Amino acid sequence: MECRSIRINAPGEVEIIRTEIPAPGKDEALLKVLYGGICGSDLGSYRGTFAYFDYPRIPGHEFSAEIVEIDEENTYGLKKGMIVTCNPYYNCGKCYSCQRGLVNCCEHNETLGCQRDGAFSDYVVMPLERIYDGKGLPARTLALIEPFCISYHGVKRADLKAGDKVLVIGAGTIGILAAMAAKEQGGEVTICDVAQGKLDLARGFGLDRFILNHGDGTFADQVREATGANGFDVVIEAVGLPSTFENCIEAAAFGGKIVLIGVGKENLDFNFTMIQKKELNIFGSRNARKEDFEQLIELVRGGGVDLEKVVTDEYPFEEAERAFREFSENAGKMLKVVIRFAG
């Protein structure tokens, strides 16, 4: 029996290919994919700008699925018919990071859809330890848990205190989800973008302030106005450009914290002494951990966050090429784009 997969052959070139349905091995399950989200890295892969991608490759690491084949004597409590989501970050288990339990930043990390073929197929095989029960959440909502984990993990790195003034730079999906996570943790949240359309979408998420960065030198003035000239306690970078990192340095308060979630390919030449002068605390944030998935499934189940609000567009599997093309052409007007595989 054949299995359809979406493959990016080269920048701007997407096709649907046909392969055999994979067979699960020991401690693995066969999953029928229900929904998949196109994330910023997938879009970067389509455009040829993402740092961790080789062609040709099946993309996709944000997804929900139904378990269709599994050894039900497993120790994870997983059963056939469960609607699940998965941790797509494969760690080696041997490097220094893994030895210390920092599996999300494994030195040899391979993420589905980036360093190895991803989940944009009718069927995929996953290790049981990476499959998480969706606890009754709708399949489309479950496909949004992974990007929320990326944002949530980054926000946790900052160890927010209630009342902290937080700036999120980048009003794409990851930025808005980071803003939602910071708000849920008690922050007073401002979000910034260069696209008015993105900020217009962000206004529906209960945030406190909005900054349109015109690139005309008024960014610093808007930061001073928003913070009483103090700067932000926490700045979260969710774009991945040299200019947005410089914005972080500029916007952070003396003694402030900066979290870098965005991924880019460009170098930056800047006055690094500002890090010393402001005594800034700068944190990288990569991937997420099992506890992030589990905590967010419970948070969303409890009504703490309405993830569905980030979905602006949905396409059927057969229109995958159009989904990528239109997302690339209209990124300033779209947030989360999902592909409906089945269900």
Image: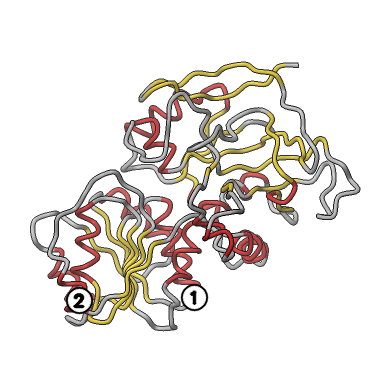
**Hey, which quadrant is residue 69 in on the image?**
top right
Looking at the image, which residue is at 41% across and 73% down?
Answer: 158
SS at badge 1: loop
Instruction: Identify which residue, 334 or 85, lies in the foreground.
Output: 85
Kind of residue at disc 2: Gln
Residue, disc 2: 276
Viewer-proximal residue among 316 and 95: 95
Q: Is mark 2 on a helix, strand or loop?
A: helix
Describe residue 120's horizontal placement relative to residue 212 as left or right: right
Q: Residue at x 35, y 56 (%)?
A: 238
- Residue positioned most to the right: 73
- Of the 4 image quadrants, the one containing the C terminus is top right
Q: Residue at x 50, y 54 (%)?
A: 287
**Residue 112 in the image, given as x and y percentages of width and height:** 55, 39
Q: Write down the quadrant of residue 341 in the picture.
A: top right
**Which mark, residue 185?**
1
Report which quarter residue 271 is drawn in: bottom left
- Outermost residue, left side: 217
Q: Relative to the observer, which residue lies in front, 289 or 2?
A: 289
Q: In this view, does 246 lie above or below 42?
A: below
- Colour basis: secondary structure
Real-space Cα separation, disc 1 to disc 2, in angstroms: 28 Å
Q: What residue type is labelled 1?
A: Gln
Mark 1 or 2, nearer chain start: 1
Q: Which of marks 1 and 2 is in front?
A: 2
* Residue at the image point whose x is 15% and y is 71% from the top: 273
User: Residue 264 vs residue 31: left or right?
Assistant: left
